[in-house]
Amino acid sequence: MHMSDALLSPAVGISMSLVSFSAMAYSVRGIKKYDFDDKKIPIMGVMGAFVFAAQMINFTIPGTGSSGHIGGGILLAAMLGEFPAFLTIASVLIIQSLFFADGGLLALGCNIFNMGLIPCLIIYPLIFKMFIKNKIDHKNLTIASILSVILSLELGALCVTLETFVSSITELPFSVFASFMLPIHLAIGIVEGIVTAAILNFVYSLRPEIIQSSCLNTKIGKASTRKIIIILASVAIITGAVFSAYASSNPDGLEWSIYKVTGQEELKGKDKIHEEAAKVQDSVAIMPSYDYKNGKTDGTKVAGVVGGVLTFALAGVCGIVITIVNKSKKKASKL
């Protein structure tokens, strides 16, 4: 559901960027408030790399000609807590936009809002936690995961149509566009919800303290996270280096919806600002569309690994910086 710049007016794109980056600043403050657990730092990096790799794997939606991929917001929130999760998914989307030209530069704020803020800061605390606050078990984790993912994708898809409508630069009627966006993302949400539930149930079976700490805003404690980190890191590497090459070639839910309305999978920006944003993105993208620039050799597997490493580094650095700031403030308060 990565929006392109062609769907947005500069005013909407810039406004949503201000909203999303303000939410990132708010999340940093939120992490400080809940005394961030140092054990979450490697989990932030590993889960960021995993979500980056998983988003490269589009799965076919039978009978539609469309495909989808996981968003990962609810998965990250359940593993890390809402604020670290939002910073992690934002890191994923920033890396994708800057270095792989996946999602427009002008649309980055919208994409962070639709795919990050909605699941991490709205649906997770209001819906997911409601189902597991009294009792965390496999049944409640499954129900909470599937319902939360579906609601996140449906609300995100609705926001895409609203942001496009308010921009008023495309020939995408709101009601018609929404009539395709909402049903196809419902189908995608069911698949992602099942995948999310499976992963969270596996983690809960192996190390329940991780899920509990996120839900209750507590520290993991003395429980070792090494085993689960090694497993998730291995899965992320295999996903990016191997499975990414077998992704569905069908257009994703957003591209499919645009095609159903306009007959085109992608639209082009029409003004100077769109052109300049595209030029900037082209100049910094190392592997546009997860491929080599010359296009002579398939670079999907390499892109999966490179992107995973970059995301791991950025998400990990976020966690380290926050920890350093927290420790310095604690020392200052004791003086």
Image (cartoon, rainbow, N blue to C red):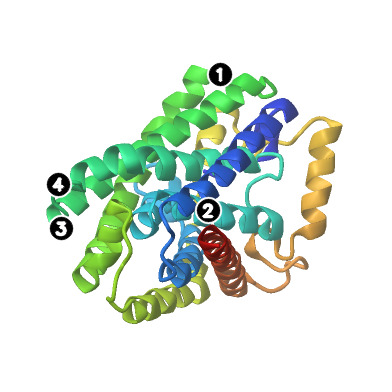
Q: How would you rate the neighbour count of disc 1 (Cα within 10 Å): few for under 14, some for 14-19, many for 20 or more?
A: some
Q: Is residue 57 visible?
A: yes
User: Residue shown at 46%/61% (left/top)?
Assistant: 51
Find numbered disc 1 in the image and state the secondary structure of the residue it sits on. Answer: loop
Q: Secondary structure at mark 3?
A: helix
Name above or below for residue 275 compared with residue 294: above
Name the quarter where the C terminus is drawn: bottom right
Circle 1 is placed at which residue position?
173
Circle nearer the viewer, 3 or 4? 4
- Badge 3 local density, few (<14 within 10 Å), some, or many (20+)? some
Seen at 49% across and 53% down, the residue is 32
Q: Which residue is mark 4?
A: 134
Crowdedness near tag 4: few (<14), some (14–19) or many (≥20) residues, C-alpha within 10 Å: few
Is the residue marked by circle 2 packed among few (<14), some (14-19), or many (20+) residues within 10 Å?
many
Give left or right: position of 163 versus 55.
Answer: right
Name the mark nearer the viewer: 3 or 1: 3
Within the image, what quadrant is residue 300 found in?
Answer: bottom right
**Residue at left 73%, top 36%?**
268
